[in-house]
Image (cartoon, rainbow, N blue to C red):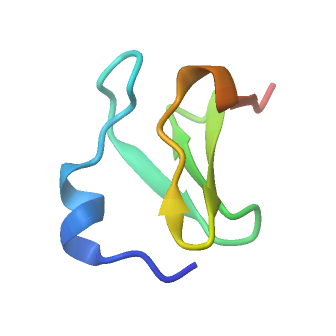
Amino acid sequence: MNLDPALLEILVCPQCRATLFVDDDASELVRHLCAGLPVRRDIPVMLVDEARALR
């Protein structure tokens, strides 16, 4: 993934406003280690309905 570091500083979870962490292996932004938001073509998909449960 090639995401702008300045963008990563301002992005938060669209549901709970938690900080997001990059998971390069899964091409996702991860929140609280409970859900992953996909990144497609280096664009974060910030839709709750698109989140993948990690547990």
Which residue is at 56% across, 45% downward? Answer: 30
Work out whether residue 34 or residue 47 is closer to the camera in this orientation and state it.
47
Q: Residue 48, relative to residue 28: is it above or below?
A: above
Q: Residue 7, relative to residue 55: is it above or below?
A: below
Q: Is residue 52 left or right of residue 4?
A: right
Which quarter of the picture shows residue 25?
A: bottom right
Q: Residue furthest bottom?
A: 2
Which quarter of the picture shows residue 7?
A: bottom left
Work out whether residue 25 or residue 48 is closer to the camera in this orientation and state it.
48
Instruction: Give x and y (percent) for residue 41.
Output: 62, 72
Instruction: Give x and y (percent) for residue 18.
Output: 33, 29
Which residue is at 18% across, 51% downward? Answer: 10
Which residue is at 30% across, 61% downward? Answer: 8
Q: Residue 21, relative to residue 32: is it above or below?
A: below
Instruction: Give x and y (percent) for residue 55.
Output: 81, 25
Q: Is residue 16 left or right of residue 34?
A: left
Q: Quadrant of the N terminus?
A: bottom right
Instruction: Give x and y (percent) for residue 2.
Output: 49, 83
Which quarter of the picture shows residue 17?
A: top left
Q: Is residue 13 left or right of residue 47?
A: left
Q: Is residue 7 left or right of residue 45?
A: left
